[in-house]
């Protein structure tokens, strides 16, 4: 049973749905691409837009500079609601990000990425049902298509709209719940200024009891979920330097080694035949999966063949570390990836050349309890031991963050589960995610705060890709879940 007041908020949300989506579309129209300096002003506008929305819901809002020198980074929006005098629940930190990924390849978008459109489900999508690891019936539905639709503006918006609705219905800011809100503008570019910010604003954050983030997925359509862990990340760029200039491959081929070839040879040794990472010590700190966890995940009826089909691959492409299922590999095991590799001539046509150097962007997805710094250092050491004669390596660190796994028996997780049940009528699944959200590890390390990941995306939302979407039904689940979370917190 849901409270009378929550029923009132739900009714209000239903009425306000179109207006809420229109507001979201306004926000989505601001191209806040954090990694590209050309969009600096747009990032500021997107921050300002969120600040205005929060202010209109009665919170005390600031747009704070980040970086060194101050203002070098994109601003962080903070907002607080004091909570009613009678409020006894936890002080909740809500984190989200207003920045988005670049749009390329832009020619593959069916509509311009920053001109949000509401589109009906594509013909035939329904028959195939849910997508991916999170398969599940229901079929694809109406969606908002734009860069940032699901990652993360659309999901943040579900929280913002629930604040607005509670204010309107109850008269109390945030329904009387004590919130601190932090909206970052650099999540998609590695959260490079976040650690310094968190340290500098300890006072603002240290009283928070728990963090809530809506930046993950559900198990599938109509299958709400709480994510109790995300993987960590160590991202590097390595360059193998050979001759001090590009060479004619006819005159020099056979006389010296080729950096492209040597780089590829070394990197191919990163995995053994069982697709285990070969760096010594790589698995030393890995927290083993428990049998209980493996059984629980196996019971979630995920559909890895369906997920592969969605990306144009047959079932036999289900490959990864030996001895683990697809879902175990995504949620519970670390990996090494080559994100990009380049060197020499990559333009049109043929050019005969031995390049002076070759580069690869190599990253590692990490699980509890691996230390990103140790993995990075071990990788660099491993490369050093494989330096081709007369060549040298150049190493760059593009940032690291640990994986996070939170207890599944906390009062906070219980409240979130109750909220999802009230919002959807379904008991949420407990899942993990292979993606990374740097702030969670930081909050744990700096302030001892655990995170509840309550996300509303779907596996086929095309995050970071052309035609990113957020389905209206997922948006609806999100606003209702946040409204119900507020209700549950009030009655603690
Ligand atoms: N929201 C995503 C992570 C995510 C997506 C988690 C879907 C679970 C389900 C986040 O914005 C993201 O893209 N993170 C990056 C890390 C960052 C350091 C660039 C990632 O996971 O690659
Ligand atoms: Mn995100
Ligand atoms: Mn992202």
Image (spheres, helix red, strand yellow):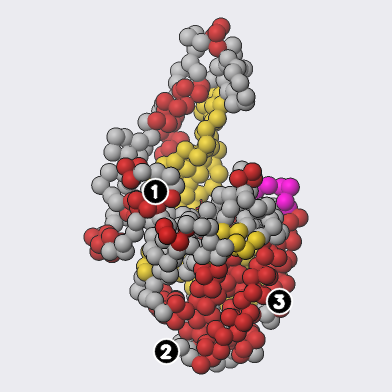
In the picture, measured across the screen, residue 234 lies left or right of residue 332, that is right
The residue that mark 3 highlights is: 55
In the picture, measured across the screen, residue 270 lies left or right of residue 93, that is left
**Residue 6's spot in the image, x, y percent?**
52, 87
The residue that mark 1 highlights is: 308
Measured along the vertical axis of the image, is residue 356 above or below residue 274?
A: above
Contact between labelled residues 2 and 3, with CB atoms less than 8 Å apart = no
Mark earlier in primary sequence (3, 2): 2
Residue that lies at the very extreme toward the right in this rendered image = 41
Residue that lies at the very extreme toward the top in this rendered image = 251
Q: CA distance from mark 2 to mark 1?
A: 39 Å
Q: Decide whether residue 37 is among the magenta residues.
A: yes
Mark earlier in primary sequence (2, 1): 2
Q: CA distance from mark 1 to mark 3?
A: 44 Å
Residue drawn where x is 59% and y is 23% of the image: 345
Contact between labelled residues 1 and 2, with CB atoms less than 8 Å apart = no
In the picture, measured across the screen, residue 175 lies left or right of residue 44, that is left
Q: CA distance from mark 3 to mark 2?
A: 32 Å
Q: Which residues are magenta?
A: 34-40
> Badge 3, how many Cα within 10 Å: few under 14, some, many 20+?
some
């Amino acid at each position: 049973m849901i409270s009378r007041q929550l029923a009132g908020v739900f009714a209000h949300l239903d009425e306000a749905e179109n207006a809420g989506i229109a507001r979201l579309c306004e926000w989505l129209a601001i191209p806040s691409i954090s990694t590209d300096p050309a969009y600096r002003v747009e990032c500021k506008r997107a921050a300002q837009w969120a600040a205005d929305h929060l202010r209109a819901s009665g919170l005390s809002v600031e747009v704070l500079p980040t970086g060194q020198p101050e203002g070098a980074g994109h601003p962080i929006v903070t907002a607080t609601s004091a909570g009613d005098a009678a409020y006894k629940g936890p002080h909740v930190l809500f984190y989200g990000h207003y920045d988005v990924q670049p749009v390329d390849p832009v020619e593959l978008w069916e509509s311009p990425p920053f001109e949000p459109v509401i589109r009906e489900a594509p013909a035939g999508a329904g028959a195939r049902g849910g997508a991916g690891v999170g398969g599940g019936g229901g079929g694809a539905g109406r969606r908002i298509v734009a860069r940032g639709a699901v990652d993360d503006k659309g999901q943040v918006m579900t929280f913002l709209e629930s604040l607005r609705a509670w204010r309107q219905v109850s008269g109390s800011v945030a329904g009387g719940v004590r919130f601190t809100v932090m909206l970052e503008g650099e999540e998609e570019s590695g959260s490079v200024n976040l650690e310094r910010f968190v340290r500098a604003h300890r006072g603002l954050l240290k009283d928070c009891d728990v963090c809530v983030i809506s930046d993950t997925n559900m198990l599938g359509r109509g299958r709400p979920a709480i994510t109790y862990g995300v993987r960590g990340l160590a991202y590097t760029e390595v360059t193998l330097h050979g001759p001090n200039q590009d060479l004619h491959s006819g005159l020099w081929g056979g006389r010296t080694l080729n950096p492209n070839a040597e780089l590829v040879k070394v990197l191919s040794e990163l995995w053994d035949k069982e697709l285990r990472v070969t760096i010594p010590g790589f698995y030393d700190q890995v927290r083993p999966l428990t049998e209980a966890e493996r059984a629980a995940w196996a019971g979630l009826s995920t559909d890895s063949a369906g997920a592969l089909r969605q990306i144009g691959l047959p079932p036999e492409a289900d490959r990864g570390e030996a001895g683990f299922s697809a879902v175990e590999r995504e949620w519970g095991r670390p990996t090494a990836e080559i994100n990009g590799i380049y060197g020499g001539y990559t333009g049109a046509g043929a050019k005969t050349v031995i390049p002076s150097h070759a580069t690869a962007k190599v990253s590692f997805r990490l699980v509890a309890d691996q230390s990103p710094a140790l993995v990075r250092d071990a990788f660099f050491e491993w490369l050093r031991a494989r330096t081709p004669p007369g060549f040298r390596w150049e190493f760059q660190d593009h940032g690291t963050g640990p994986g996070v796994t939170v207890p599944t028996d906390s009062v906070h997780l219980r409240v979130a589960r109750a909220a999802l049940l009230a919002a959807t009528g379904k008991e949420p699944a407990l899942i993990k995610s292979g993606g990374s959200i740097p702030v969670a590890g930081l909050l744990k390390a700096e302030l001892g705060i655990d995170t509840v990941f309550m996300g509303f995306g779907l596996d086929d939302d095309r995050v970071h890709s052309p035609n990113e979407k957020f389905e209206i039904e997922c948006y609806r689940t999100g606003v209702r879940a946040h409204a119900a979370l507020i209700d549950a917190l009030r009655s603690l």
